[in-house]
Image (cartoon, rainbow, N blue to C red):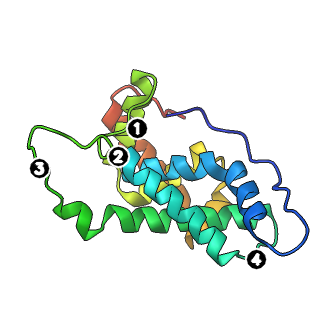
Amino acid sequence: MPAPATQPAAVPVPPGPPGLADTRAVVACYQDMVYRIAITHTGCRGDADDVFQDVFLAYHRRQPQCRDDEHRKAWLIATTLNIARRTATSSWRTRVVPLNPGTVDPGLAPFSFRTDLQDAVARAMQTLGEDHRTVLHLFYFDDLPVAAIADLLGLTEGAVKMRLSRGRALMRTHLHEGLFDD
C-alpha cells in the first residue's frame, strides 16, 4: 500500500455561497484519502473510481455545513465507506458474467501496486472483514487516532482497540511474516 500521507492541510474555502470552487478545493485536499479508502474496500480500480466520483458528487450536491476540517474529513470518510459498502454489495456486481469467459474487464481487474510487498499487504487487507479492514485503514493509512475512529464509526474506544488488535493478528497470520508487529 502507498505510504501514509500526511494530514491534509486546511481547505481554503472561498468566501460567498458554496459551490464549484469549494468542491474543487475539497477534492484537491482529500482526493488521495477518499481513493485509498475506496480501493481498500472495493478491491478494484473501476469500482474505486465510481465510489470516488459518487463521494464528491454527493459533497457537491449536498454542500454539507462542516464546522471545521476534521468534521469535513469525517463526513467524507463516512460517505466513502457507505458508498463503497453499497457498491461492493450491489446486485449488479454479484450478477455480472463476462461475455468471453477467458477475459477480464480491465476496470474490474484487481488493483496492483508498485511493489510485491504493497500487493501482499493489499491482498491481506482484502481477506479481512469490513470491520477490521476499516479500522486498520483509518488508523494506519489515514492516521486517525482511536478516539476519532470510535466517534466516526459510532463505537466505543475499547471496541476500536479490539478491532485493531484482532485485525493486526489476522494480518500477521495471513502474511506469515509479522509485518504489523508492535
Residue ranking furthest to the left: 101
Residues marked 1 and 2 touching at CB (< 8 Å): yes
Residue that numbered label 1 is attached to: 122
Q: Residues within 10 Å of mark 1 (few under 14, many from 20)?
A: some
- How far is disc 1 from disc 3 in space, using C-alphas? 28 Å
Q: Looking at the image, is mark 1 or mark 4 earlier in the sequence?
A: 4
Residue that numbered label 3 is attached to: 99
**For discs 1 and 3, the disc positioned in front in the rendered view:** 3
Asked whether, in this view, residue 65 is left or right of residue 89, the answer is: right
Residue found 24% across the figure and 66% down from its top: 92
Residue 79, placed above or below residue 102:
below
Quadrant of res 60: bottom right
**For discs 4 and 3, the disc positioned in front in the rendered view:** 3
Residue 16: percent from the left, percent from the top? 89, 73
The amino acid marked with disc number 1 is Ala
Residue that numbered label 4 is attached to: 65
Asked whether, in this view, residue 86 is left or right of residue 10, the answer is: left
- Tag 4's secondary structure? loop
Residue found 44% across the figure and 47% down from its top: 39
